[in-house]
Image: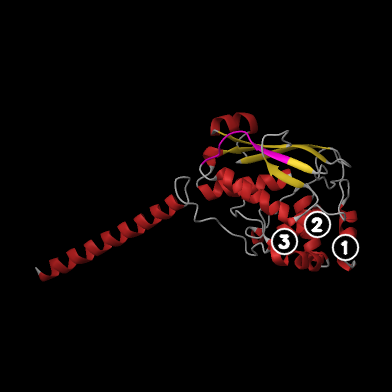
């Protein structure tokens, strides 16, 4: 009887442990879901620090590795046309971003927070969330609707219209498959990824080592720009980088910027 009692105690302990693990897992999923509190936003390895961004940007521009990071993030892959990839960015003094429909609890607040950070990272273009003559729109779609329009190969898409020189970008349309996002933070990660494309980040990072370095990793899970992402955006929206620049011209301009005097 004593042995049977011990076996029962062990079995009960195992059941209790499994229940605790399952309960903890479900609690974490809930916290990270659209019904939770958004507490599990995934941060980059190198968090954004606006107070040191100016110094970081100048130092980074003198680093060949960062210059490669810049061109990877900004320049798209060559397309079938054979045209050499060039920088394109917004040149209007004000660019309005409009949410065409609701993406879920907290999404509009999150977008407004991103735009506020974007305006602190650079001073060349004023981005705003609103309805007045929007240049960038964001649409959240049901899965079947997204598949019909964009296919199965993505969870978010940004289509832009632009000139290969000034005035650069003139329109951007973001579409997100809302039903393929498995949590609130993943929806945010997709939104910041696509927004970065919409403001001129034409490329992607594909190395696994970059998965928490940039929001433009090809399947990113992070919900905030990194310090290097912010440095790229700060330089992109400066007098040193202009629409129409090639990779060679960009790298030369970044070297000049690093050696310039304020």
When the figure is inspected, residue 137 is found, relative to residue 38, above or below; the finding is: above
When the figure is inspected, residue 134 is found, relative to residue 90, above or below; the finding is: above
The residue drawn where x is 48% and y is 45% is 34
Q: Report whether residue 218 is seen.
A: no
Image quadrant assignment for residue 159: top right
The answer to whether 61 appears left or right of 36 in the picture is right
Q: Which residues are magenta?
A: 96-104
Q: Nearer the viewer, residue 50 or 65?
A: 50
The residue drawn where x is 67% and y is 34% is 131
Q: What's the mark number on residue 257?
A: 1
- The image shows residue 244 at horizontal and vertical percentages of 88, 46
Q: CA distance from mark 1 to mark 2?
A: 9 Å
Crowding around mark 1 (Cα neighbors within 10 Å: few <14, some 14 to 19, many 20+) is: many
- The image shows residue 4 at horizontal and vertical percentages of 13, 66
Q: Residue under label 2, please give it.
A: 235
The residue drawn where x is 35% and y is 55% is 23
The answer to whether 131 appears left or right of 107 in the picture is right
Answer with mark 3 or mark 1, whichever residue precedes in sequence.
3
Quadrant assignment for the C terminus: bottom right
Q: Residue under label 3, please give it.
A: 228
The answer to whether 162 appears left or right of 139 in the picture is right
Q: CA distance from mark 3 to mark 2?
A: 11 Å
When the figure is inspected, residue 70 is found, relative to residue 261, above or below; the finding is: above
């Amino acid at each position: 009887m004593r042995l049977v009692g011990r076996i029962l105690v062990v079995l009960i302990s195992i059941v209790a442990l499994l229940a605790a693990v399952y309960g903890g897992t479900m609690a974490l999923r809930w916290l990270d879901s659209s019904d939770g509190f958004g507490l599990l936003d995934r941060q980059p390895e190198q968090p954004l620090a606006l107070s040191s961004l100016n110094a970081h940007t100048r130092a980074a521009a003198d680093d060949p590795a960062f210059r490669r990071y810049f061109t990877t993030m900004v320049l798209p892959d060559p397309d079938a046309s054979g045209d050499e990839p060039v920088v394109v960015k917004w040149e209007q003094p004000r660019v309005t971003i409009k949410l065409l429909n609701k993406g879920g609890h907290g999404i509009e607040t999150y977008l407004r927070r991103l735009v506020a950070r974007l305006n602190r990272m650079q001073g060349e273009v004023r981005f705003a969330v609103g309805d007045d003559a929007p240049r960038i729109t964001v649409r959240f779609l049901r899965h079947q609707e997204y598949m019909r329009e964009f296919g199965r190969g993505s969870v978010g898409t940004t289509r832009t219209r632009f000139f290969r020189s000034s005035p650069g970008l003139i329109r951007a349309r973001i579409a997100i498959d809302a039903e393929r996002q498995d949590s609130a933070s993943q929806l945010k990660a997709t939104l910041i990824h696509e927004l970065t494309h919409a403001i001129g980040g034409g490329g992607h990072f594909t190395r696994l080592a970059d998965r928490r370095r940039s929001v433009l990793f090809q399947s990113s899970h992070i919900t905030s720009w990194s310090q290097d992402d912010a440095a790229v955006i700060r330089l992109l929206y400066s007098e040193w980088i202009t629409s129409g620049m090639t990779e060679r011209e960009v790298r030369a301009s970044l070297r000049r910027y690093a050696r310039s005097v304020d």
